[in-house]
Amino acid sequence: MILKDFLLEKFNSGEFEGIGAKKICSILGANSRAEKNSVIEASSSLEKDCRIVYDNGRFLLFENSGLKTGTVRGNERGFAFVITDSGDFFIPPKNLNGALDGDTVIVKKSISSRGSTDEGEIVKIIKRGRDKIVGTFDGDCGFGFVIPDDKNYHLDVYIPVKKTLGAKTGDKVVVLITDYPEKRRNPEGKIIEILGKKFDVKAEELSIIKSYDLPLDFTDKVKLELDKIPDSVSEKDLVGRRDFTSDYTVTIDGEDSRDFDDAVCVKKLDSGYELGVHIADVSHYVNFNSEIGKEAYSRSTSVYFPERVIPMLPKKLSNGICSLNEGVIRLTLSLIMKIRNDGAVESFELFNGYIKSKKRLTYTQVQRVIDGDDSDLDETTVTAIKDMRALQLILSKVRNDRGNIDLSVKESHIFVDDKKNIVVEPRRSAEAYKIIEEFMILANETVAEYVFYMNLPFIYRIHEKPAPEKVEGFIAFLKVLGILVKWNAETCHPKDYQKLLDGMRGEPIFNVVNKIMLRSMQKAKYSPENVGHFGLSSKCYCHFTSPIRRFPDLVVHKIVKGVLSGEDVVSKYSTLTQEASVISSQNERRADEVERMMDDFYKCRYMKKFIGYEFDGVINGVTNFGVFVELENTVEGLVRIEHLPRGKYELDEKTFSLRSGKRSYTLGDRVKVLVLGVDQRARKIDMKILVDKNDKVW
């Protein structure tokens, strides 16, 4: 046993806890300088790993010290929070002790002058969260400062003479931090890349991408491997696979889609339907030990912006040999399900297969058929769409009957038109989308159950039950609106949420209730353990249908194919399912954040031309410094307290409102606002309320 493990064993037993290094050396008989140094080094290593703590001349087990480890979340006003597993600590500026946003730290509870029980002090920085910052250079005389784009990183970075890379004031840059501050001094760094001028669309877009350290290209090693991948499927690739090329298989995607993960085929039977869900067999071309596989693991997901995509896989795979393009043979992992007229899956089979897609359909074309206009499609295709629609309606009813929660949150559709104008509008929720949605959900559930009952390693897509305190807050919010529910925080079921939404559709407050309900729920994530999917009211769920753009789907394919071929799946994938679940969940959150930030940037660019214009909106957020208003086009702006009618406003957390005397502004209130300005750096839009819920003009 090495000394470090031996010491930890002694600390865990209590033998060494509460004593100092000198006493430990005495007990161990460590008399020489070398022996004492070994004990000190081993103790320091345990302290660095947060297993023990040295406090006032004695060692304590970390778990008994009252200290916590966590991550710093900064704020532009200088204070911060430390997020720990057991709760959050508020950190005033004087207690940061040099820590910055993103740092991993040790924190202890401190005595608060404001009587708070959640105030803390950072006692040690374990690991710096960032070594690169993206921002705007402001300098003269050969030196200057970089003002971070992320306001949570509240200190500017000092750039010494000869380390500016020739940057000029107003340039968007990437800076490498070379020296971190003591107490409240600014960090020091050197500029390593100039992205362009601030407010230039491409420079700002690059700034956001670089802020999240997203890769813009694939490595040379990946490109070398791509040279060995064929452009078309060979006869050899088809050996041992089921031939589905005679089936009328189609893809249904958006007009601007370039990669096609899934194709479907529906056949009407006397007893119901046969549904074929054919998914691109990416796993045939990507091995996890290859450079392409390692890069896919690292990225975990494709990231989508209005004018570009950062793909998980190179285009040769995603748009080429793996994409189920019309009229060409492609390899698939195919799930064939027999579905009764009541929506129950009577039987299913999984195959290594291949298809030749007969039609590349768009949601717009499918919607026209649903609406009764089939003039631009042939009879075979129209019949296929009508059969798909009929099956979808059956599956939708089954899901609704069991309690599926259809949040129907208004999403933004942001794009650049043919004239290079930014367009922001609500994303249409056409019935055509539900066909593919239902088919993919059923496929995901079927595959998840198939592997679950074999008790094999797997990656599940889970959505845990809402935390009781979140549910209580949501119930309190509903009570303010005059909506009383019979369910409670401990016994709530997906069907309770569904009934609530169904009863409110068409009401002015519906979208706000939708959003607050969403905030009361847990975030879906990947896990090697199955706990079900609350939002879908599903006992067993996974992601199987998009291996071109999601790494967990690729792992699921490898496991399923391993089962079909008789591989030892347990020894081969147990560790990978654990590790990939964690990194894929992390990278999914990162992708969500950067996509949201990019959307905010495009919305700001879009709204610049509407400064001075009036819009109708709904209050969808209330804080102690103002209210947030969402416009009908999905753009959100802030009405600061100074832009509300004159008064002394106070936040009433119980009623989710700002109040001043008899006047109040509450979630769900309809208002007319004036767009005052756009802050592109902060990516925020300032507004002023002109008319309130009583149609009173201010």
Image (tube, rainbow, N blue to C red):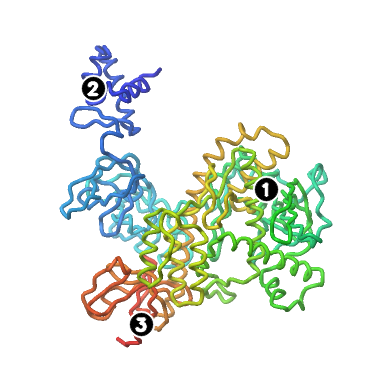
Query: Which is more toward the observer, 610 or 72?
Result: 72
Q: Residues within 10 Å of mark 3 (few under 14, many from 20)?
A: some
Residue located at (44% from left, 79% from top): 609
Mark closer to the chain start, 1 or 3: 1
Q: Is residue 457 above or below residue 640?
A: above
Rendered location of residue 407, percent (x, y): 51, 65
Mark closer to the chain start, 3 or 2: 2
Question: What kind of element bears circle 2?
Answer: helix
Residue found at the far left of this picture: 113
Residue located at (41% from left, 71% from top): 636
Can see residue 590?
A: no
Mark 3 to mark 2 CA distance (whole Å): 69 Å
At label 1, which amino acid type do we have? Val
* Residue designated by label 2: 21
Mark 1 to mark 3 CA distance (whole Å): 54 Å
Q: Residues within 10 Å of mark 2 (few under 14, many from 20)?
A: some
Query: Closer to the observer: label 1 or label 3?
Result: 3
Question: What kind of element bears circle 3?
Answer: loop
Q: Quadrant of the N terminus?
A: top left
Q: Which mark is residue 651?
A: none
Rendered location of residue 103, percent (x, y): 34, 46
Residue 79: quarter of image: bottom left
Can see residue 428?
A: yes
Rendered location of residue 608, percent (x, y): 42, 76
* Residue designated by label 1: 282
Mark 2 to mark 1 CA distance (whole Å): 57 Å
Mark closer to the chain start, 2 or 1: 2
Residue found at the far front of this picture: 486
Q: Residues within 10 Å of mark 1 (few under 14, many from 20)?
A: many
* Residue designated by label 3: 693
At label 2, which amino acid type do we have? Ala
